[in-house]
Amino acid sequence: MSSAGPVLPLHASSPQQAADSLRTKYIWLAVYFFFNLALTLYNKAVLGNFPFPYVLTGIHTLCGTLGCLYFYFRGAFTLTPLSDRENFTLFLFSLLYTINIAISNVSLNLVTVPFHQIVRAMTPLFTVLIYVIGFRKVYSVMTYVSLVPVVAGVGFATAGDYYFTAMGFILTLLGAFLAALKTVATNRVQTGRLKLSPLELLFRMSPLAFLQCIVYAYFTGEISGLREYWPISMDSTMMIKLILNGAIAFGLNVVSFTANKKTGALTMTVAANVKQILTIVLAILFFHLAVTPMNAIGIILTLAGGAWYAKVELESKQKTSAVPDLRPKEDDAVKA
């Protein structure tokens, strides 16, 4: 006589749990916007007097390393034992970050800024392609539709002189794809088999990215330029500005990784497009940037598209939370 296996309890997330989860996601996204906008504007100010973008990125990764070391010795996180293969995966992950920065900088010299921005605005579409083709993920029709104004709006908002070389077009397109791949990889490393915490991921990636940035800076002539710059223009005020800039970058990386883990890669690429528009809005308010009616339409389109996408995601999460889950509650506790 065969005995039946244990019956798994049916349960679904309560409306309150779903609301708390969404509230947490929106809070992290809001903090992400704050740090991202702050660093974007601060980078613009610093690079005006410190024209070494790879060195500046190296300072960011160095501050990331030091910041993570501080929290590690404070017991904020522990290191997960990793195999050689997993360590190699993280090396490739850090390489993806620095290559993405390098290609973005190189392509900017071969295309105009408006063209660069409109191609980079296609990152959410590349993210969808990666998930659909690589992970067999299925999105609703409304998700696809809501992405249209998010992408098109950036094009209108940054409309200008669209000039590019053939190589510039290829590199800019590659840069947009790598940006999507980087965002997806960030999410997978934190939610997939490795399940690294944001601080541990940053701790493992920052030293590798720092070394890579220094190599890039050497081969692009920034190191030799810095030697000439240092005795003439480097003073205590600039040192404080660079350290503060690195501290903000460290905060942004932690917040960005956490927001990515909690909201998902596609949401982060949509948020990046909305951030571009918010940067333009701040430039209008504080730097009196002139805008055309087409630019204004693009700003409205992207902001409305971002809100629409958030609404579609909210409704999708509510439907998912209402569906009975066959997993035992202990699994939920482990997952959380």
Image (spheres, helix red, strand yellow):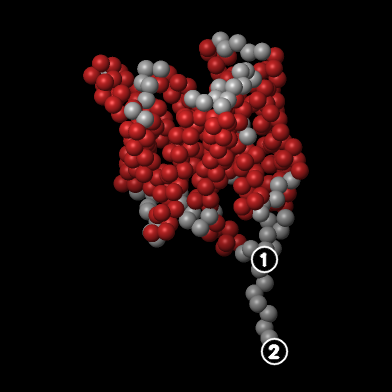
Q: Earlier in the sequence, mark 1 or mark 2?
A: 2
Q: Amino acid at mark 1?
A: Pro
Tell me where residue 229 appears, x and y as whole percent: 28, 20
Is there any visible trace of residue 159 in the rendered image?
A: yes
Residue occupying image coordinates x 56% and y 27%: 165
- Find residue 284 and report its image quarter: top right
* Residue 147, above or below 134: above
Q: Nearer the viewer, residue 302 or 97?
A: 97
Q: Which residue is mark 1?
A: 9
Quarter of the image with the N terminus is bottom right
Quarter of the image with the C terminus is bottom right
Q: Nearer the viewer, residue 277 or 94?
A: 94
Q: Nearer the viewer, residue 266 or 131?
A: 131
Q: Which residue is mark 2?
A: 1
- Find residue 127 and report its image quarter: top right
Q: Residues within 10 Å of mark 1 (few under 14, many from 20)?
A: few
Residue occupying image coordinates x 61% and y 52%: 134
Q: Nearer the viewer, residue 109 or 140?
A: 109
* Residue 46, above or below 55: above
